[in-house]
Amino acid sequence: RKVDLVYTRVRTEEKLLLEALRRRDCAVNLVQDSGMVLSMDRQRVTEADTVLMRSMSFTRARYLATFLEMKGLRVLNSARTISLCGDKALTSAALAARGVPMPWAFVAFDEDACLEAIEEKGYPVVTKPVLGSWGRMVARLDSRTAAEGVLSTRFGTGGAQDHVALVQEYVDKPGYDLRVYVIGRAVGGLRRRSEHWITNTARGAVPERYEVPVVHAKLAEAAAEAVGGDMVAVDLLETRGGDIYVNEINHCVEFARSIDETGVPLPDLIAEYVASGAGG
Ligand code: ADP
Ligand code: ZN
Ligand code: MG
């Protein structure tokens, strides 16, 4: 199999993926996203049959995946999956359409309308940018004054494309959240423990080993299916009462900070999936 690995930066992940693919006799080309110029026609641009999309930029990943699919290539994850997972409002809609359990959520487009809807629900609630990662700008609103402050920033800065507020139920977690890796099927997971309510490892949460129970595996697989994800990291929020919700789905799986703790051989599992010809 001939694979183009599209990247922004060659991080630990990309190095490990490259090695794992080569061990499986894949011919791999590294292609930097910033250098790609794609014409809007079906002309071939590469010898490869498969593209492993590892661009860190949502803009580039989404467009490149769309155009490369148009040119007849198998792209992992697919353009549809990237489009849905990269935008948390669209992820929520895809999950809701399939009845996958998630925190209640709404989307609003105006400061006053949003504040009114929050007031009706009551505090605390969570709001986060629809585009974003690593826990950046995720905010818990505990009061009306906090909501007013955050919403005036959300709607008073940026451009029209930024003037959307995703508001979610605040889930009172027991000190951690859970991540299940779905590479064709649920293959393992990670518990992220933190004193802070934001439990991204990029924000200092400690990764721990987690034996994924069957119910969690099934939930993560249903979430992956709702967005057509071939290889995704599904984040779950557990309530203190033991209920479990899907919070978000990450289309570009990161594992450098946690590979030792999880014991899940993600580079090999991903390479195996790429080599198998499945998905896309
Ligand atoms: P990102 O894409 O930036 O990781 P997330 O939606 O995963 O955005 O939010 C980051 C973290 O914030 C989550 O891992 C979780 O710890 C916390 N969090 C996000 N939304 C909620 C929520 N609705 N209730 C409780 N905790 C949340
Ligand atoms: Zn995310
Ligand atoms: Mg997250």
Image (cartoon, rainbow, N blue to C red):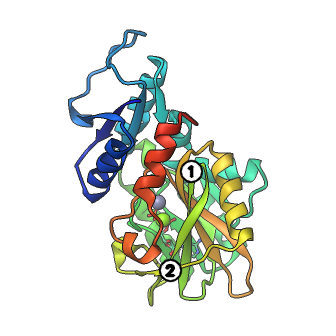
Above or below: residue 187 compared with residue 121: above
Badge 2 is on which residue?
209
Q: What distance separates the C-alpha of mark 2 from that of mark 1?
A: 40 Å
* Amino acid carrying mark 1 in the image: Phe
Classify mark 1: helix, strand or loop.
loop
Camera-side mark, 2 or 1: 2
N-terminal label among 2 and 1: 1
Point out residue 260 in the picture as x, y percentages from the top left corner.
37, 74
At 73% from the left and 83% from the top, the residue drawn is 242
Mark 1 packing: few (<14 Cα in 10 Å), some, or many (20+)?
Answer: some
Residue 50's disc number? none
Residue at screen point 40% across, 55% down: 267
Q: Residue 3 appears in which quarter of the rendering?
A: top left
Percent position (x, y) of residue 143? 56, 82
Q: Nearer the viewer, residue 237 or 75?
A: 75
Q: Is residue 185 above or below residue 143?
A: above
The circle drawn on residue 109 is 1
Q: Is residue 56 visible?
A: no
Circles 2 and 1, Cβ within 8 Å, touching? The answer is no
* Position of the C terminus by quadrant: top right
Q: From the viewer's perspective, tell me whether residue 116 is left or right of residue 203.
A: right
235 and 25: which is toward the camera: 25
- Residue 17, how many percent across, how many down? 34, 50
Q: Where residue 1 sits: x, y (%)?
A: 41, 30
Q: As shown in the figure, which amino acid type bears the numbered disc 2?
A: Arg
Q: Is residue 234 left or right of residue 68?
A: right
Q: Nearest the camera: 57 or 161?
A: 57
Other-residue count near label 2 (Cα within 10 Å), few / some / many at <14 / 14–19 / ≥20: some
Find out if the beta carbon at label 1 lies less than 8 Å from the nearest ligand 1 atom: no
At 60% across and 54% down in the image, what residue appears?
108
Q: Is residue 15 visible?
A: yes
